[in-house]
Image: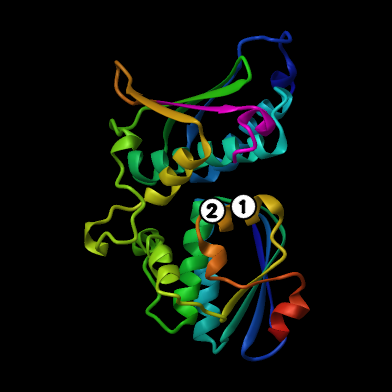
Amino acid sequence: MNDDGVGEPGAPGRSLRLDVDLARLADVRAFVRATVIRMGADERAVGDIVLSVDEWVTNVVRHGYRGGHGPLEVDVDEEGSDIVVHVRDGAPVFDPATAPPFDPETPLHLRRPGGMGIHLMYDLMRSVEHRPLPGGGNEVTMRRVSRSAEAGGIA
Amino acid sequence: MNITVDQPSATAAVVNLDGELDGSNYGRLIKTGQELYASGVRLLVLDCTALTYMSSSGIVALHSLTRVFDGHEPPDPESGWQAIHDIGGDVNEGLTQDHVRLVAPVPEVDRVLDRTGLKQLIPIHSTREAALAG
């Protein structure tokens, strides 16, 4: 925990690197929660950001790492009034924008699992961007204002 | 997440959820409910008072439990994830159920229930006594 407290005011973000599996989702959430609270995010923003990161990382472990484990990096930065979270993995390339929409009309046999979490992530974040990493893996960048009042009461 | 069970009668159970419900433990909750149903329990009260967090994995577990307590075949783990899509269908068709009830979710959990549509499917009570009384 001491490492988390080190740093200059306005220092560029915080990083977590770990070998992630389902049992360590709680560690990822605890890191993101503590970091965005320290950055001044309000309660609503904290909840949205923690949930969105958790949904994406759950998806990475369940599908990208097939329920096993693999490398994960989480960087949390501030840009103006935004919190920006980068999540990098070593899993096969998967752009969440290509996930099937959350559509109850889709016949069961045509659906793929995991759509609910990705739907929530897009719902809660102002933007979600994906890029394949040059050496393999994915980087997903999520962005949300740190204080809900500045979003005009949305969310 | 700690799961403990109180059974005030042969057909009603209160499952106390303590901690965080996520992708690592939602299967354990489904299994607990399945075992209770198999033992004759027909009213499942999930006490969320001490539940501090829930992701969509928890939504999958709750939805799966409504299916189990409606007498459907217990979904396997993978179909549990696919079954999440059925919530919208169930709600749109006006289906409601009263065999699975929640007690006192904290605001952060309540928001997830709301955003995923599950709140329309699962009754929420403020106390376990009220939930047991229905």
Q: Amino acid at mark 2?
A: Arg
Image quadrant in which you'd find residue B33: bottom right
Q: Tell which residue pokes out farthest to the front in this image.
A: A152
Q: Amino acid at mark 1?
A: Arg
Q: Quadrant of the C terminus of chain A?
A: top right
> Residue B72: where, in percent of width, then height?
39, 81
Residue B20 in view of the camera: no
Q: Secondary structure at mark 1?
A: helix
Image point 54% across, 87% down: which residue? Answer: B39
Q: Which label is found at residue A25? A: none
Q: Tell which residue pokes out farthest to the left in this image.
A: A110
**Tags 2 and 1 touching, CB below 8 Å:** yes
Q: Name above or below for residue A74 compared with residue A20.
A: above
Q: Secondary structure at mark 2?
A: helix
Instruction: Compute the Cα span from label 2 to label 1.
Output: 6 Å
> Residue B4: where, in percent of width, then height?
68, 69
Residue B82 in view of the camera: yes
Q: Quadrant of the N terminus of chain A?
A: top right
**What residue did someone put label 1 on?**
B111
Q: Say yes or no: labels 2 and 1 on the same chain.
A: yes
Chain of residue at mark 1: B
**What residue did someone put label 2 on?**
B115
Taking B37 as reference, is B78 left or right? left
Quick one: B18 or B107, which is closer to the camera? B107
Quick one: A87 or A73, which is closer to the camera? A87
Q: Residues within 10 Å of mark 1 (few under 14, many from 20)?
A: some
Image quadrant in which you'd find residue A47: top right
The span picked out in magenta is A140-155
Taking A125 as reference, is A27 left or right? right
